[in-house]
Amino acid sequence: MALFSKDIETMDDLFLHTLQDVYYAEQKIEQSLPDMIEKASEGALRDGFRTHLEETSGHVGRLEEVFGRLGHSPKGVTCPAIDGIVKEANEIAGDVADASVLDAALAAAAQAVEHYEISRYGSLIAWARELGHPDIADLLGQTLAEEKATDAKLTELAESRLNHAR
């Protein structure tokens, strides 16, 4: 099985494919966050997930703007990585009975998502600059900053409240 579609021959093709990948991922995350909000018992974690759900809607909107600037309709391609991360999170959440342990598991799963997104947006920003799209790099940079901030908040929350053995 090929890592990428055989239709990817240029950096422009790779850039567009990765945009489609992260567009799919953001939509998947947007669908998954309400379930995470419902499962979380710690108030600050729930609030953080709610905030990130709002941000994720903005990320989808920014990506749609990027597609428009490139002259393409927004379209996602299946992202096996995000599908796997979400599937693993759901499986782990289904196996955890203790609410405080579940909160730690949910925060860790959310960070796995953030780290994936951070890597994707970092690549997209570099490629946008290389391909002569500084305006698109700036838009994607806004999303990258929000993803990094969410990751930092999750780390602080996990270390200060969620990861304590009881």
Image: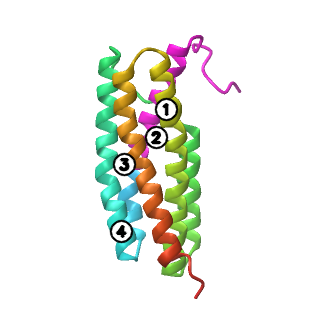
Q: Report the residue at 57% width, 51% height from top.
A: 85
| Residue 69 quadrant | top left
Could you tell which of marks 3 and 4 lies nearer the N-terminus? Answer: 3
Identified by mark 2, the residue type is Ala
Q: Mark 3 and mark 2: span between their CA atoms?
A: 9 Å
Q: In this view, does 26 lie above or below 96?
A: above
**Does the magenta portion include 134?**
no
Q: Mark 1 and mark 4: span between their CA atoms?
A: 27 Å
The residue carrying mark 1 is 21
**Quadrant of image for the N terminus:** top right
Q: Is residue 30 above or below residue 77?
A: below
Q: Looking at this rendering, what residue extends furthest in the bottom direction?
A: 166
The residue carrying mark 4 is 46
Do the CB atoms of the residues marked 1 and 3 lie less than 8 Å apart? no
Label placed on residue 25: 2
Do the CB atoms of the residues marked 1 and 2 lie less than 8 Å apart? yes
Q: Mark 1 and mark 3: span between their CA atoms?
A: 14 Å
Q: Report the residue at 50% width, 23% height from top.
A: 127
Q: What stretch is highlighted in magenta?
A: 1-30
Residue 90 in percent (x, y) is at 53, 60
Q: Helix, strand, or loop for circle 4?
A: helix
Q: Helix, strand, or loop for circle 3?
A: helix
Q: Report the residue at 40% width, 27% height from top.
A: 137
Q: Is residue 16 visible?
A: no
The residue carrying mark 3 is 30
Could you tell which of marks 1 and 4 lies nearer the N-terminus? Answer: 1
Identified by mark 3, the residue type is Glu
Residue 46 in percent (x, y) is at 36, 68
Identified by mark 4, the residue type is Arg
Assign the magenta stretch its main secondary structure. Answer: helix
